[in-house]
Image (cartoon, coloured by chain):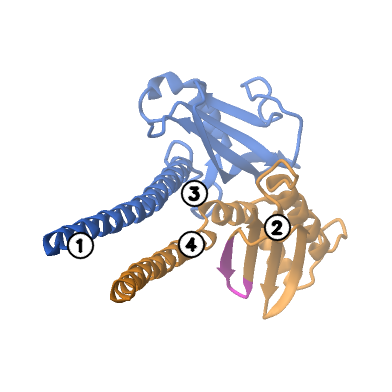
Amino acid sequence: MKQIKKAQEEMVGFALIIIVVAVILLIFVGFSLKTPKKEAVESFEVESFIQSSLQYTTDCRDTLRVFSVQKLISSCRNNEICLDGRNTCEVLNSTLKGIVKESWKISNNSAVKGYEFKIISDEKEMLKFEEGNITSNSKGSVQYFPNAEIFFKAYY
Amino acid sequence: MIQKKAQLKIQQMAFMLIAVTLFFVLVGMFVLTIYVSGLKNSAASLDEKNALLLVTKLANSPEFSCGEAFGNVRTNCIDADKVMMLKEKISQYKRFWDIENVEIRTIYPKSENKECTLENYPNCNILKIREGNITTEYSNFVSLCRKKVFNGEVENKCELAKLMISYNSRK
């Protein structure tokens, strides 16, 4: 009877050791699974994309010069029109849609599954468009300008 | 009889110690595997980041960058006219950059793929500066600018392009 009790005690001791180690292991795995999320925050590629897109020369001009996307954003804010009569906001919308569509091609075979583009001016949404699926893995960037913020996020 | 019981107890203890040690060794190996795979991932990610930084560094180097030719100093802006001239003198830049191949491809506006030569420039969209074996290719977005004549006046024309490089990455 005494021997059986002793054996039981030892078994309980062994089980306790296993439980303690399992809990430590679970905590470790939990921590290691949490870390990869920081990748979504930093992206040189998206940052370069926004900077380069802003320098793009559009086909809208006034009497003096041809507008870049950056200039078109401020012209759109002031409801200006191009020399050929088109609305600057319409030109901005179509140009940016074209740029994003050609730069971040969405397909089943490509890594990019979707994107989201947004321009906020004076705390109002000036322009917004999105395409494809929104997934949990993303790369994004924000560019700040006087009176305007440009957001772009690509989903993988 | 008591001696035999003590021996049995020692044996039991030894087996228990071996079992616990084995268990900890297995757990340690598991943890080490996770740690090593994490290291490999971070090495690959660092390699990619370095390549992207190299592309940005190249785009902003004096041989490629717009400088003040298109107004203010811009980042990620490449002077296409300058690059066309660089293409002609590329033999003088052997081993200047630690890269095998450099290519600039216009993305927007979209056009038919045509490699740039002095004869067809600027009616082309692929600027191959140096040709070599492609091992690992990295790219980043740039603004490709040039001067253009419109109604007798010179103005700036910037397009969206991708600067692509291929270089020998760490094995």
Residue furthest right as drawn? A85
Which region shows up in magenta? A140-148
In the rendered view, would you say B77 is above or below B120?
below
Q: The residue marked by circle 3 belongs to what chain?
A: B
Q: The residue marked by circle 2 belongs to what chain?
A: A
Q: The residue marked by circle 1 belongs to what chain?
A: B
Residue beneath the point at 41% across and 52% down: B34
In the rendered view, would you say A3 is above or below A88?
below
**Disc 4 target residue:** A33
Residue A115, disc: 2
Tell me if mark 2 has few (under 14), some (14-19) or many (20+) residues whose alpha carbon lies within 10 angstroms of its own: many
**Disc 3 target residue:** B68
Marks 1 and 3 in Cβ contact (< 8 Å): no
**In the visual, does B8 lie left or right of B138?**
left
Q: Are marks 2 and 4 on the same chain?
A: yes
The colour of chain A is: orange
Marks 2 and 1 in Cβ contact (< 8 Å): no
- Residue B40 position within the rendered picture, expressed as x and y whole percent measured from the top left: 40, 45
**In the visual, does B48 lie left or right of A131?**
left
Q: Amino acid at mark 3?
A: Glu
**Disc 1 target residue:** B9
Examine the rendering and report whether any part of residue A62 can be seen. no
- Residue A49 position within the rendered picture, expressed as x and y whole percent measured from the top left: 60, 52
Q: CA distance from mark 2 to mark 1?
A: 68 Å
Q: CA distance from mark 3 to mark 2?
A: 33 Å
